[in-house]
Every structure is written in C-alpha cells, then in structure tokens.
Image: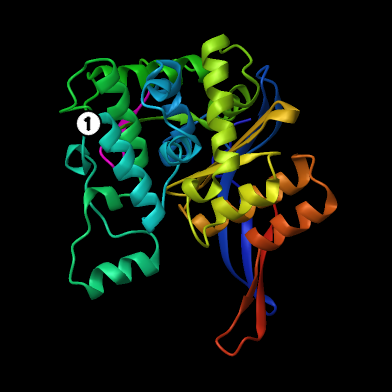
Amino acid sequence: MLYTHNPILVTLTRGAITESVHRGAFALVDDSGKTRLAVGDVLRPIYPRSAVKPLQALPLVETGAADHWHLGDAELAVACGSHSGEERHLKVIREWLAKVGLSEENLECGPHFPISDIAASRLRENAASPRRIHNNCSGKHAGLLSTAVYRAELTRGYLHREHPVQRRVGSVLSQVSSAELVRAPIGVDGCGIPVIGLPLHALALSMARFGTGSGLGAARSRGAQRLYQAMVREPFMVAGTGRWTTAAIEIGEGQFVVKTGAEGVCCAIVPSLGLGMALKIDDGAARAAEALMSELLARFAGLEEHGAAKLLALGQPTLYNAAGDAIGLTCVTGF
C-alpha cells in the first residue's frame, strides 16, 4: 500500500499537549527481500545521504586498496562514518592520507565547522577557518581517493559521476540493493558527491545483505564483514563524543550497527537476524529519526531487556526545562 501522507511516527509532549509531531516511513527487510514490517510509503525514492556510507566504502576493501595501504579499523570506521571533527578523527585521516601520498588539500569536499561544539569553539577561539578535513565526510573521501590512487586513476575530479570512483560506487549500490538505478533520481550530496534516490525497501534490503553477505559474492561479503566489524570496534570513529550513533553502536555490543544521514534518514544492520532497517522522517528531524530507530532496534533487534531499555533512554529522552524539571516526553507511535 502506498501512503499519500506518511503517518505520524514520533511525537513530543509537554504536559497534556502534544507539542510537535513528525511523520515518516520505515521498512524492515530480510536478506531474501522479504518485508518483515513496513509503515508509510517505502517504495518512493529518497536520498539516503550519509546513511549509505558503509555501502560506498565497499570498493575500498574489495579492490584490495585497504590492504595495500595497511588500513585498520579506525580508518575503515571513519570511511563509513560522519565524524565530529575531533582531534583523533583528524589525526587518523591526516596520517591515512599521508600513507597514500596525499594531503587534505586533495580532498574535494568543502570545509565546514566541526560537528563537535568543542572542536568548533576551539577553531573560533583561534580565529581559524574550518578546513576540508573538518568536513564530516572527509573519511569517506579519503577512502574514495585511496581507491583511486591504488587503481592508478586521476584523483582530481573524483566527485564527478563519470569518474571511475563514482562508477564503482554506483555499481555497488545497484547490485546490493537490486534496484534499477538507470532512471533513479540523482542529486548532489552535501559533500559534493552524487547521491542516488533509493526506496526505503531497497535501502533496508541493502543493509540486510551487507550484514549477512547474502547474494554479494565472496569478495564483497568479506568486505562488508570487515567494515561491519570496524564500525563495532571503533564506534567513536563513526561519529564522535556525545553522538547518538556512537552511543547506540556501543549499546549494541556487536548485535547491530547504525548509520544516520542528513534530513532524517537512518539505517541499521542486524546480521544475526539477517535484517536491515531503513527510515526517513518527512520533515528531516534527526531527533525523530533517532527516536524511531531506537524503538525499532529495541523491539526487533533481539536485544536483551537491559540493552533495549538503554537504547530507548538514549533515543527517546525525557524533556527537561532549564531548572532540571521533567516537563515532557519523546514518544514513538503509529505502529
């Protein structure tokens, strides 16, 4: 069933009043393509944004570039991540680029202030401008460049759709999602690379296959497993201090990984259940995406009661006023 209007899935209450509502859609799909649960319009293409970074990182491993450059879990995790621009993130990426014979000047993502308030404040206090390496996608870009250098391809212009780097990424997305992408909508992501429209069902299927390797072939399956383990072992590199993504992966203790994207997108991979999850909040609210994914994982990821409770507390916090009084709730509804 296609929804003309997606249902309300997350509400924020203050006292007796529902003060804010967020509509959206989500899909839970297993690695055979079977829909376990779907709410809202999961067949309309959406831009997955940074939630698809683990898939975009697959060529880095399966081409042999990761082994050639002796990359470890920290590099692979930040290639899948949207980092906060904290000192360890920057150190890892700078040292990684040096291994490849490049520098941050080769990054073609635009600069922005770090996501980390502390890191951003330090730049401002020193009257320093943000650099390209501060872009939360600079780890992904380091991965794209590393693959290009390994394959003896031009590094300049690696953002363009016709560059071999982007052709490889497009091939991965098509194969893993089983989606017909020839006529798919294409835009430009915040970091400058092409972003391809995928239905939530196809995105969830991609995550399920990433987790189990089903239908991927031996090399791609090994690459997905390696990236998954890197995210589990280095959750800080996937996001950073105080970020929901990092905290959620830590709570999961290897049972799942999550990856958020801009404009209210979030995905999860649950290998032990052969399950992928994908959601999109219509108004783009990150707080609603985190609340809804916390609910889905708590219900359907096979967590023990303690872990589920911690995840719900993380994603659906009580709202407090400036005096520290509890004055409202974040609630998931609609299914």
Percent x, y of residue 37:
71, 34
Q: Which residues are magenta?
A: 184-192
Q: Which type of secondary structure does the marked residue at label 1 adopt?
A: loop
User: Where 69 falls versus 48 (above or below)?
Assistant: above
Q: Which quadrant does the N terminus fall into?
A: top right
67 and 109: which one is in front? Answer: 67
Q: Residues within 10 Å of mark 1 (few under 14, many from 20)?
A: few
Does 205 sit above or below residue 266? above
Residue 223 can be seen in this image? yes
The quadrant where residue 105 appears: top left
- Residue 85: where, in percent of width, then height? 36, 55
In the image, residue 251 lies at what x, y percent? 68, 51
- How has the structure been colored for display? rainbow
The answer, for residue 335, to whether it is visible in the render is: no
- The residue depicted at 25 percent of the width and 67 percent of the height is 123
Query: Which residue lies most toward the right here?
Result: 305
Answer with left or right where residue 24 lies relative to residue 197.
right
Instruction: Give the mark count.
Output: 1
Residue at (44% x, 35% y) in the render: 53
Instruction: Kindly identify the residue that appears in the image at 45 percent across and 17 percent down.
Output: 62
Q: Horizontally, is 296 left or right of 228 in the view?
A: right
In the image, what residue occupies the spot 81% across and 55% down? 306
Task: Name the dominant secondary structure of the magenta segment.
Answer: loop
Tell me the residue that label 1 is attached to: 101
Amino acid residing under circle 1: Gly
> Residue 315: x and y, percent?
63, 59
62 sits left or right of 328 in the view: left
The part of the image, by quadrant, that contains residue 213 is top right
Q: Residue furthest top?
A: 217
Indicate yes or no whether the magenta region holds residue 321. no
Q: Nearer the viewer, residue 319 or 274?
A: 274
